[in-house]
Image (spheres, rainbow, N blue to C red):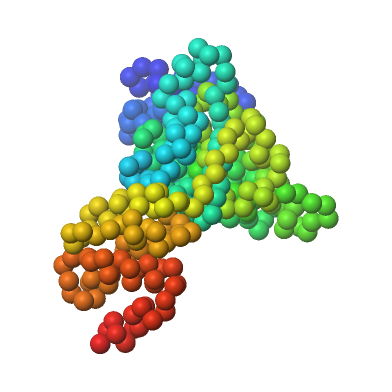
Amino acid sequence: KPMGKNRVLVKSGSEGKYVVDVDKSIDITKCTPTTRVALRSDTYTLHKLLPSKVDPLVSLMKVEKVPDSTYEMVGGLDKQIKEVKEVIELPIKHPEIFESLGIAQPKGVLLYGPPGTGKTLLARAVAHHTDCTFIRVSGSELVQKYIGEGSRMVRELFVMAREHAPSIIFMDEIDSIGGQRVEGESGGDSEVQRTMLELLNQLDGFEASTNIKVIMCTNRIDILDDALLRPGRIDRKIEFPNPNEDARVEILKIHSRKMNLMRGINLRKIAAQMNGASGAESKAVCTEAGMFALRERRQHVTQEDFEMAVAKVMHKDADKNMSLKQLFK
């Protein structure tokens, strides 16, 4: 902590706190709270700024640039957007509302549903609209081969989140460490259990008012441990089903917005042919339609391109898929 022009207050382990001089080569404006520093053994002058104590693997999880995804890029999920805003965005932007009502702020939310339904996209959009530090970690990254490594990474993850608050910790594939516990597990499974127990400990150990929010994602909510899902740790569970026809039309409109389309293209007819398709498959149809136009060296995309793209993405008709020989002839 700066204490004037060339002096700072430092804490040196169990020895106590000292007001020390700062070496001329050090920029005092970089001496912020929680900065690790080195002192000379004889004069106790601060002569070096040390890197963060956080593991480099954990530091890499922090996304430096704010995600460019917005709510306008998420189609057909109006109900889910509203629920995530209530749990994540509202407490960060307007904590006074919760204080006036006398209720605790939500800590975390679980997004679950089939792959490609927009869970990760919505998490990135929330981080964009709240200007929070976005820390993305996959559950599989926390599964380490050495005993205690996974739980240590979880601890350091929350330490980094506190240092960069307000922050959002986005934990993808949480089922890889949050599965139900059974008796008689092998050594590898017991290490995964230790990692999950540390995660439960960290979720209990921080106050919701510290502006740290946790978003978890999974495709398999049925195998998650009940201790992880209880209120107080995960305050809301939001389902992301495959989009219906109206939602598919909306997604197709979003992803074809910048495409050079022929007049009279009927996106609703395209959406009707994609029964059961996910949001990711709807986006892939737009990309494939553009590729069909590209192969024929056209500057615009036609209705037929979209129909062939649906057949290719949905695997309905193998005859409509272009072979490599046709593509490169």
Residue at the (30%, 50%) spot, across then down? 254
x then y, percent, for residue 239: 54, 44
x then y, percent, for residue 75: 38, 46
Left or right: residue 132 versus residue 214 is left
**Which sits in the foreground, 281 or 91?**
281
x then y, percent, for residue 165: 46, 31
x then y, percent, for residue 229: 66, 39
User: Is residue 265 among what the camera can see?
Assistant: yes
Image quadrant in which the N terminus is located: top left
Left or right: residue 60 versus residue 189 is left
Left or right: residue 287 versus residue 93 is left
**Which sits in the foreground, 281 or 22?**
281
Residue at the (50%, 31%) spot, across then down? 87
Q: How many marks?
A: 0
Residue at the (57%, 53%) spot, across then down? 219
User: Is residue 44 among what the camera can see?
Assistant: no
Residue at the (38%, 33%) spot, across then down? 130
Residue 321 vertical placement versus 144 (above, below): below
**Which sits in the foreground, 198 or 253?**
253
Residue 322 vertical placement versus 62 (above, below): below
Left or right: residue 283 versus residue 202 is left
Image quadrant in which the C terminus is located: bottom left
Q: In the displayed image of the protein, which residue is found farthest to the left?
A: 299
Q: In the displayed image of the protein, which residue is found farthest to the top?
A: 100
